[in-house]
Amino acid sequence: MCGIVAYTGKNAASRIILEGLKRLEYRGYDSAGLSIWNNNSLKTIKKTGRVDTLDREVKRTQVDGHLGIGHTRWATHGAVTENNAHPHVSSDGKFAIVHNGVIENYEQIKHFLEEKGYTFHSDTDTEALVNLIAYHYQKEPENNSSNGNRFFNSVRKSLNHVQGTYGIAVICSDHPEDLIGARHGSPLILGLGDNEHILASDVGALAMHAQNVVYLNDSEVVHITRNSFNIATITDESVEAIVQRVDWDIEESELGDYKHFMEKEIFEQPKALENAMRGRFSDDESTAKFGGLNITPQELRQVDRILFCGCGTAWHACLVAEYLIERFARIPVEVEYASEFRYRNAPLDKNTLVFVISQSGETIDTLAALRESKRKGFQTLAINNVVGSTIAREADGGIYQHAGPEIGVASTKAFTSQVMLCAMMALYLGRLRDMSFNDGVKFVKALKEAPKQVETVLKQSSHLQAIAKKYAKYEDFLFLGRQSMFPIALEGALKLKEISYIHAEGYPAAEMKHGPIALISPDCPSLFLAPQEEVFQKTLSNIQEVKARKGPIIAVTSEGSDFPRDLADDLIEIPSAHPAIQPILASIPVQLLSYYIAVERGCDVDKPRNLAKSVTVE
Ligand code: F6R
């Protein structure tokens, strides 16, 4: 949440910052702003709304220089106003700061500073921090000024008094060559360019200028000029920087011929699934193999229970993992919302393996669940899409999704790629236990067929578009499915509500009669996920119950199934497949339906209201 970019170097800072902010806009789009060292003074421009509005204002005012900071905001403290937009400037006018995170003790800091005469103009927590820096700067010896140490130390010392999370970039009018960055709980990456340095909340915002990067760790502060950088902890221990090559294809993050990133990412799923599987099968052993688990087959044999944690769509992938691993590997699985687990102090069996799933690898609750598990001494693994993310770096081992950048706020290709990796994990764990060689062969074959089968579902996009037109006017929806279709029902409901603002709920189909059936009426359509599998007939009975109450019915079933053609108002067919693949195939129609309904309703599909893609605050 919130994206920050900062630049110092030979090029025009405002262009680079604006370009970076546009790539970070998925992190928040309530307001945007920048501060630039321009004609010997700090110039700050802020606008509510999108980065484009800021861009126009920067062009109009022709503010530019070679050092600056920028921000795109997802509001936490304070309404969406220009006053609350970042950067925030200290009351003496010397410092400007951009901040991603939450300063939890800002009221105490503010009160302390107000008594010392500092004034505040916004409702944000960030303004307390920038004034605290100004306060410490006053106390620092002036003989430290020439090389920027006074500035660096004032930021560093201030951070020792801060509780909460931050990724920050700060500039100071006394030090027009210096830029200070720091992180704790919110990501911050330093890009090393040629005679230039750039700081950003994620690699996508700096990859076009820097191929080498340093991922800052929690409680680290970096002092940057255009030719040098130095990292220390906030308690002033020196840190040796680990420089890594960027793994980011800039073209992959362009929209191309698509109208929205969500549409592009839905259609990229066959490729994302191929990438998740590439090089990860051993045909001789008819199993999956993973390079980065850092846990031996012998250790995995000792695992009695697996706990999966994630948030939102990633949590739905965890639920699919529960069905697949319990069914094919016969290992008990528990699934927890990361945000609940972190504070629940759940008793875990000593042979529990903890698995977290996160596309971004920066979701604060998932990260906290991972840290809590590690602190208790559990072995932790992560399924994660963004290479070098905090979760990827902190888990004991893991599996990269290689799904490519996911920019649409609503997750699509990351979800099915997570489900694919969970299916592969079910295969791997199953083959370590009771799954036979022949069943393994069938499983591997089925997984390899998935991308082609997804393509055939995607070919039905115009059919789904026509269905979407018919249903776009409704304000309530139910998504229903049993067994591994239940998480897909939850995912379908989440997709629809987040991008089209239609109230939607996902339920196990049989649960409907324990309450939600009261909603059924001609005004509340139900989407049933009913591929032909063990509980198929049971699902058909649930559909009859809705039909008897005159609820409109959309059904997703498998080709050649015994689904009575007159039972549903609208029918969508997916290929008949191995049960491990069904959740992936069933996801495609619910994604397309939600997408086309949102387009039909004129919604801003890639930037739905109130949302941000990477949730780095609690
Ligand atoms: C919904 C969506 C969110 C994320 C959730 C976790 O479409 O994208 O629910 O799934 O915020 O994000 P990650 O996977 O980055 O941890």
Image (cartoon, grey):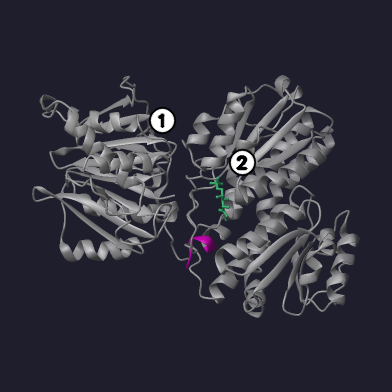
Magenta span has 494?
Answer: no
Q: Amino acid at mark 2?
A: Ala
The residue that label 2 is drawn on is 338
**Residue 559 drawn at (x, y percent):** 80, 64
Q: Is mark 2 within 8 Å of ligand 1?
A: no
Give the magenta-colored segment's residue range: 259-263
Q: Which mark is residue 346?
A: none
Label 1 neighbour load within 10 Å: few <14, some 14-19, many 20+: some
**Residue 534 drawn at (x, y percent):** 88, 53
**Residue 430 drawn at (x, y percent):** 78, 33
Q: Which mark is residue 217?
A: 1
Whether pointer 1 and pointer 2 mark residues with C-beta atoms closer than 8 Å, the reply is no
Q: Amino acid at mark 1?
A: Asn
**Residue 618 visible, this orientation:** yes
Q: Secondary structure at mark 2?
A: helix
Label 2 neighbour load within 10 Å: few <14, some 14-19, many 20+: many
Q: Residue at x 82, y 35 (%)?
A: 330
- Main SS of the magenta segment? helix
